[in-house]
């Protein structure tokens, strides 16, 4: 590759500096070391003994000891300083978690406690606002004593060009390790220094990342330089840079689309991923999924039902991993209750949840073992005898439990590894035909673990398990067929396993497509499959766990940076999360939208353009919700110039998947109002219908708060709908443009002969779509609007009532007066003083004054008023 020479320059430099250091070491005297040493080292490091006691703390201590005669004295001094600083730093543990430290819990109780806490902070402990992430630098902060001491040591060592010191300073400024305040400019300077000093790939990656994102305003974004540094780091084997470069080549970001380059780097990552997996216990390291779309907590970017991620086919995939994670605790609670009542299915699910772990619950192997064992004991006695009279269901689940128990013993998970015990359990499981037991015993035979190696027996066992649709077994069987040269059968098994998203299956398929074995060579297929493998191996290349934790703890800055790294590597989930965090157009009704303090934190990195970039990248990776968001950004001109046609195209693309109710709704609205696309009531109606169809009103998960929100909204719509109708009787409201629109649309509807049209149905769509906001999810503005309307209605009603009352009183009075005056003579116009004193004073100007808003029909004023009150 071209830049290779450039990459070697730093190495030349290092060698040169080493050479100089060496020669200076020869010349340098011990006294000089001593005199320089004193301020850095602490007491025990005396002139004569520093070489031997250098390993006092820190892992690199031995280095200096062993290489002191080889390395320059300055460098050695630096190493010592770094060790000392490390020791100091590790003493500056972050302050112990305060009493209010608890993360957002699920369930109504947990949530209210969480918000009570937030409210408490808002009211009484209104801390300083967090710094703006993408725009400004943090204020200088005073460092704690040991920290500033350590920083001083590191800075001195960095001045001596110690890579470790430079690296540490850079990390501390970037991540804020050891409570060091963040300073992205400083971090960039340090990373850059290290990258040019010795071509350190980690530093090059960071420089590339900062050039790509311009994070913290440390440096002006420069995609060409970003690409250069990432390529350098990738050549040196930095996994994150390899993924970044591969992604940029495959998506055509800052580089022409180039499938070969993309395959080259993705394959490199995939190879590492598979090597990592196979380096694990029998059966391989388990690749735990840590990447979640944070928007899914709320049912997707657009809320439950409106987002593609929780609508249509996705709504039905309600499993423990895709569930909104707040509901998991409730499910667990329910299952726990059932399990204690002796329901084996609940016990099994709980055990498996403990074993696999899920988003909100970590793996708990001891608990899993306990539950699996309880389940197995329902069927087998301690001696392995089968208990009489056990139900079929219990038998089946006990077999599965046996499989898991054996697996845990085989892999030494939560207990010491034991092939003998594992085999016992597998044999028990196989008696009842458990697939996991068959597969696992097959692994033992294949690799000769505690049994003699026997590939034929292994193949038999794999075959039995594969017939039961166990993906791992299918992959192993496929691999065996591949070894035999039966590529067609192998591919068949890999493809079946790939349906379950099995990592190794994709890897084999990618290899076959890459080399053109058994099928046509295809660069794009290979690239896509390698990408899947690389991205499934999150653990070796991404930092989702840290990001998720930071997000859960409310540390949005850390979360954003971490997600952004994943996003740069091309992981769609990371891109969606970054965009979601940066999204300014959040139309959701959350607490954060009414509590200013939280809002401040949430908008810390508000940058519509960045959000737009990541929405776009996420949308290009087939995220339907992001596609709709993209449309919103084009429609509203957020981070770009407003473009209605592009918006319509985005919505159309999203609606084609038949998943996004939001997109259909928007399309309906655009058709209705002729925005971006042709005005067409018929199509509008169709899109509205589709939106309703896609939007699953039926309860799909038991206790989803979001679902309540949805129901509440629809209920609220009905209520306000009724109110609005009643207001429409009033002439003032009748003049509202929506009404004329309504009439026009209704006439149009009749002309178009919409026989099936229900007025309610129509109104419903009209009311939500016809308002200036186009969102199905505009719950806050909807509610506010409705509230305003209700308030207005109330005020009007009161006015009416008041006026009527007053008018009736006055009418009565007048009538009484007239009655009294009729028998006698009419009073002279100019002589009111002749009236009897006991009568109330009549009001001469009464009729004029009282014409008011709503004169009664018998009132002579009525005609005047009805004519438009022109006469007055
Ligand atoms: C809160 O406490 C938990 C353990 O109790 C800890 O893991 C977590 O890091 C703490 N969070 C903060 C922000 O201190
Ligand atoms: C970069 O330098 C740091 C500090 O010396 C070191 O810990 C790290 O392993 C280096 N990275 C690579 C890829 O060599
Ligand atoms: C600093 O913290 C980050 C994340 O918290 C971690 O990945 C990194 O290794 C740390 N660096 C050092 C030098 O401790
Ligand atoms: C951050 O570092 C730069 C130099 O790298 C320095 O000029 C600036 O003052 C620092 N900012 C703060 C807030 O310490
Ligand atoms: C088996 O269980 C059924 C009910 O579950 C019971 O009627 C029957 O007596 C039991 N038989 C034995 C041998 O325990």
Image: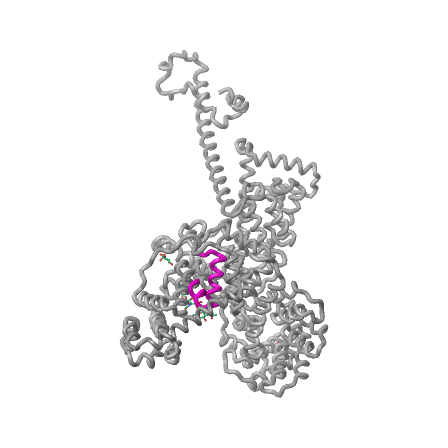
Point out residue 643 in the picture as x, y percentages from the top left corner.
Answer: 57, 44
Q: Main secondary structure of the magenta part?
A: helix
**Residue 342 appears in the rendering:** no
Q: Residue furthest bottom?
A: 452
Point out residue 317 in the picture as x, y percentages from the top left corner.
Answer: 61, 62
In this picture, is 528 found above or below 220?
Answer: below
Q: Nearer the viewer, residue 174 or 547?
A: 174
- Report the quarter where the N terminus lies: bottom right
Q: Nearer the viewer, residue 304 or 620?
A: 620
Point out residue 12 in the picture as x, y percentages from the top left corner.
Answer: 46, 69
User: Quarter containing ligand 1?
Assistant: bottom left
- Asked whether 118 falls inside the magenta stretch, the response is no
Q: Which residues are magenta?
A: 192-216
In this picture, is 432 found above or below 133?
Answer: below
In this picture, is 317 found above or below 723?
Answer: below
Q: Residue at x 66, y 80 (%)?
A: 461
Q: Quadrant of residue 820?
A: top left
In this picture, is 48 found above or below 287?
Answer: below
Q: Quadrant of residue 520?
A: bottom right
Q: How many marks?
A: 0
Q: Residue at x 49, y 37 (%)?
A: 793
Colour mapping: one colour
- Asked whether 195 falls inside the magenta stretch, the response is yes
Q: Quadrant of residue 522?
A: bottom right
Q: Residue at x 65, y 43 (%)?
A: 758
**Residue 34 appears in the rendering:** yes
Point out residue 619 in the picture as x, y percentages from the top left corner.
Answer: 58, 55
Q: Nearer the viewer, residue 793 or 516?
A: 516
């Amino acid at each position: 590759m071209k830049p290779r020479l450039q990459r070697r320059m730093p190495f030349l430099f290092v060698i040169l500096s080493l050479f100089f250091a060496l020669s200076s070491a020869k010349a340098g005297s011990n006294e000089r070391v001593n005199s320089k040493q004193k301020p850095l080292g602490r007491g025990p490091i005396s002139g004569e003994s520093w070489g031997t006691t250098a390993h006092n703390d820190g892992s690199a201590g031995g280095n200096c000891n062993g290489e002191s005669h080889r390395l320059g004295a300055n460098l050695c001094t630096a190493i010592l300083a770094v060790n000392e600083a490390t020791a100091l730093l590790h003493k500056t543990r972050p302050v112990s978690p305060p009493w209010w430290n608890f993360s957002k819990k699920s369930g109504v109780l947990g949530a209210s406690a969480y918000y009570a806490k937030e409210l408490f902070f808002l009211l009484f402990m209104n801390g300083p606002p967090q710094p703006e992430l993408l725009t400004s630098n943090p204020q200088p902060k005073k460092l704690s004593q040991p920290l500033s001491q350590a920083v001083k040591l590191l800075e001195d060592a960095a001045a001596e060009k110690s890579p470790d010191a430079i690296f540490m300073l850079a990390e501390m400024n970037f991540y804020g390790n050891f409570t060091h305040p963040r300073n992205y400019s400083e971090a960039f300077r340090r990373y850059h220094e290290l990258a040019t000093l010795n071509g350190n790939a980690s530093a090059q990656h960071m420089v590339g990342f900062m050039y790509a994102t311009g994070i913290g305003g440390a440096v002006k974004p420069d995609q060409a330089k970003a690409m250069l540094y990432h390529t350098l780091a990738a050549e040196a084997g930095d996994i994150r840079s390899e993924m970044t470069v591969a992604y940029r080549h495959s998506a055509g970001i800052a580089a022409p689309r180039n499938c070969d380059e993309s395959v080259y780097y993705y394959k490199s990552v995939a190879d590492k991923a598979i090597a990592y997996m196979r380096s694990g216990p029998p059966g391989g390291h388990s690749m735990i999924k840590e990447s979640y779309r944070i928007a899914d907590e709320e049912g997707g970017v657009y809320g439950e039902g409106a987002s593609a991620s929780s609508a249509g086919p996705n709504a039905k995939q309600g499993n423990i991993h895709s569930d909104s994670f707040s509901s998991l605790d409730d499910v667990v609670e329910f299952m726990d209750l059932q399990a204690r009542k002796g329901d084996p299915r609940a016990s099994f699910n709980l055990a498996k949840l403990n074993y696999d772990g899920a988003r909100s619950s970590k793996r708990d192997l001891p608990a899993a073992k306990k539950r699996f064992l309880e389940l197995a004991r329902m069927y087998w006695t301690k001696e392995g005898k089968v208990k009489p009279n056990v139900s079929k269901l219990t038998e089946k689940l006990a077999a599965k439990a046996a499989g898991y128990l054996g697996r845990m013993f085989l892999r030494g998970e939560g207990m010491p590894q034991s092939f003998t015990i594992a085999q016992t359990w597998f044999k028990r499981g196989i008696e009842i035909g458990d697939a996991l037991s068959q597969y696992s015993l097959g692994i033992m035979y294949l690799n000769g673990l505690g049994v003699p190696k026997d590939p034929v027996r292994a193949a038999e066992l794999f075959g039995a398990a594969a017939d039961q649709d166990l993906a791992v077994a299918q992959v192993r069987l496929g691999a065996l067929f591949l070894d035999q040269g039966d590529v067609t059968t192998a591919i068949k098994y890999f493809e079946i396993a790939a349906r379950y998203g099995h990592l190794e299956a994709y890897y084999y398929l990618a290899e076959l497509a890459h080399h053109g074995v058994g099928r046509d060579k295809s660069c794009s297929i290979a690239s896509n499959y390698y990408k899947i493998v690389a991205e499934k191996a999150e653990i070796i290349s991404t930092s989702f766990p840290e990001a998720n934790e930071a997000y859960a703890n409310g540390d949005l800055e850390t979360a954003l940076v971490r997600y952004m790294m994943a996003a740069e590597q091309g992981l769609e989930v990371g891109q969606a999360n970054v965009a979601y965090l940066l999204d300014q157009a959040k139309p959701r009704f959350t607490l954060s939208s009414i509590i200013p303090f939280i809002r401040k934190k949430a908008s810390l990195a508000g940058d519509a353009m960045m959000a737009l970039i990541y929405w776009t990248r996420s949308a290009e990776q087939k995220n339907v919700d992001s596609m709709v968001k993209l449309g919103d950004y084009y429609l509203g001109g957020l981070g770009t110039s407003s473009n209605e046609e592009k918006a319509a195209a985005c919505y159309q693309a999203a609606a084609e998947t038949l998943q996004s109710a939001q997109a259909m709704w928007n399309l309906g609205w655009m058709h209705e109002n002729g925005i971006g696309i042709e005005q067409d009531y018929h199509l509008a109606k169709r899109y509205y219908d589709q939106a309703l169809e896609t939007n699953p009103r039926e309860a799909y998960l038991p206790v989803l708060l979001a679902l309540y929100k949805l129901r509440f909204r629809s209920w609220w719509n009905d209520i306000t709908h009724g109110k609005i109708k009643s207001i429409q009787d009033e002439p003032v409201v009748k003049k509202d443009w929506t009404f004329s629109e309504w009439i026009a649309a209704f006439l149009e509807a009749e002309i178009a002969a919409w026989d099936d049209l229900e007025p309610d149905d129509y109104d419903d769509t009209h009311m939500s779509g016809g308002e200036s906001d186009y969102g199905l999810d505009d719950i806050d503005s909807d509610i506010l609007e409705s509230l305003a309307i209700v308030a207005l209605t109330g005020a009007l009603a009161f006015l009416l009532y008041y006026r009527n009352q007053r008018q009736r009183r006055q009418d009565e009075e007048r009538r009484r007066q007239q009655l009294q005056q009729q028998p006698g003579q009419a009073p002279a116009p100019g002589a009111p003083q002749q009236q009897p004193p006991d009568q109330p004073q009549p009001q001469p100007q009464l009729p004029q004054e009282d014409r008011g808003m709503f004169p009664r029909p018998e009132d002579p004023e009525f005609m005047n008023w009805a004519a438009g009150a022109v006469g007055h």
